Amino acid sequence: MVKSDKKENRAFLQKSIKHLEAHGFKDIKADLKGYDRPKSYVRKGSTAKITPDIVAVKNGSKYFFDISLKSERPRLLKTKWLFLDTLSRMNSNQFRIITTRGHYKFTDTMLADINLTNKNPIKI
């Protein structure tokens, strides 16, 4: 999710965290009250910060999760996904996308645009 969309979609973020907890993820970090905040990364040459929506650990592996909901800023979302995918592959971590009903087509189109068709979104 883009930072401007986070305020509107806190309920879905909370629902996603509950889903991950039910599937055995531990040490969850999210930008919500009651959770530690995930680490932000600064793009070189600009002041833009990229923060994953959720970071969690399962079986010793670190997972980065990003929420995919329709956005008015799809270019920024594509940049964020590419960065998180590259970061996770560099450090032998995992990157997953979480979406919900009504946003499947948007998510699939975005993944196809940035050539991340190997990603299967988690549908909640």
Image: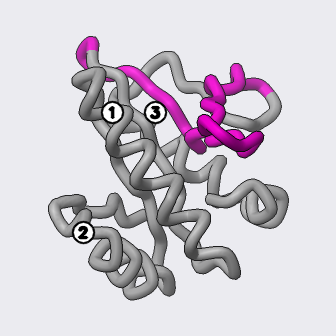
Q: Give the residue number, with chain letter if any, for mark 2.
A: 115
Q: Is residue 104 above or below residue 34?
A: below
Residue at image coords 34%, 78%: 113
Answer few, some or many: residues within 10 Å of disc 3's Cα (few below 14, many 20 plus, some between 14 and 19): some
**Residue in the image at 48% along x and 65% along y:** 78
Q: Residue at x 33, y 69 (%)?
A: 114
Q: Residue at x 28, y 19 (%)?
A: 61
* Front position in the image: 99 or 39: 39
Q: Give the overall secondary structure of the magenta segment.
A: loop
In the rendering, at what x and y percent does residue 34 appear? 77, 25
Magenta-colored span:
34-60
- Secondary structure at badge 1 equals helix
Q: Is residue 10 visible?
A: no
Query: Which mark is on residue 24?
Result: none
Labels 3, 1: front one: 1
x, y (%) of residue 100?
Answer: 47, 71
Q: Earlier in the sequence, mark 1 or mark 2?
A: 1
**Residue sitting nearer the eye, 87 or 103:** 87
